[in-house]
Image (cartoon, rainbow, N blue to C red):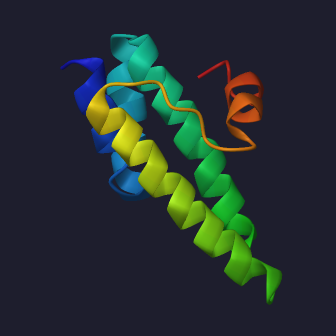
Amino acid sequence: MDGKTKAIIAHITIFGWIIALVLNSTEKDEFASYYIRQLLGIYLLVFLAVIPVIGWIISIAGFVFWILSLIGAAQGELKETPFVGKYFQDWFKAI
């Protein structure tokens, strides 16, 4: 399976992310790894949405980031999540 397919699978809920992570662990692909790290950061960011009022804003931002990430993966381009993408790549570089 190529990296683009793994990256798109990772965008299909958290279960798709786990499947892409397992598939990528046996046969590493930098493109897939990039989007797996980006999505981990987005999912953790959205997890903070349990905070009242601020959580709504975080949820909307997380959804927009997810859409932008999906578009980048589908186009085969490495598009960084606005504002926080470079941090996600640094924090989760072990993945």
For the point 69% across and 28% down, which residue is it?
92
Looking at the picture, tell me which residue is in the foreground, 56 or 9.
56
Quadrant location, the C terminus:
top right
Looking at the picture, tell me which residue is in the foreground, 36 or 70.
70
Quadrant assignment, res 51: bottom right
Quadrant assignment, res 55: bottom right
Q: Position of residue 68 (x, y in %)?
A: 46, 49
Q: Position of residue 6 (x, y in %)?
A: 29, 30
Q: Is residue 92 above or below residue 39?
A: above
For the point 61% across and 41% down, which residue is it?
81
Please tell me how many numbered marks the rendered image carries.
0
Q: Position of residue 42 (x, y in %)?
A: 61, 51
Question: Looking at the image, can residue 19 be seen?
Answer: no
For the point 67% across and 36% down, which residue is it?
85
Check the image and name the residue furthest to the bottom: 53
| Residue 36 horizontal side relative to residue 52, left or right | left
Quadrant location, the N terminus:
top left
Q: Is residue 76 above or below residue 62?
A: above
For the point 67% across and 55% down, which residue is it?
44
Q: Is residue 50 above or below residue 2?
A: below
| Residue 40 horizontal side relative to residue 15, left or right | right
Question: Looking at the image, can residue 16 be seen?
Answer: yes
Q: Position of residue 16 (x, y in %)?
A: 34, 48
| Residue 94 horizontal side relative to residue 16, left or right | right
Looking at the picture, tell me which residue is in the foreground, 77 or 95.
77
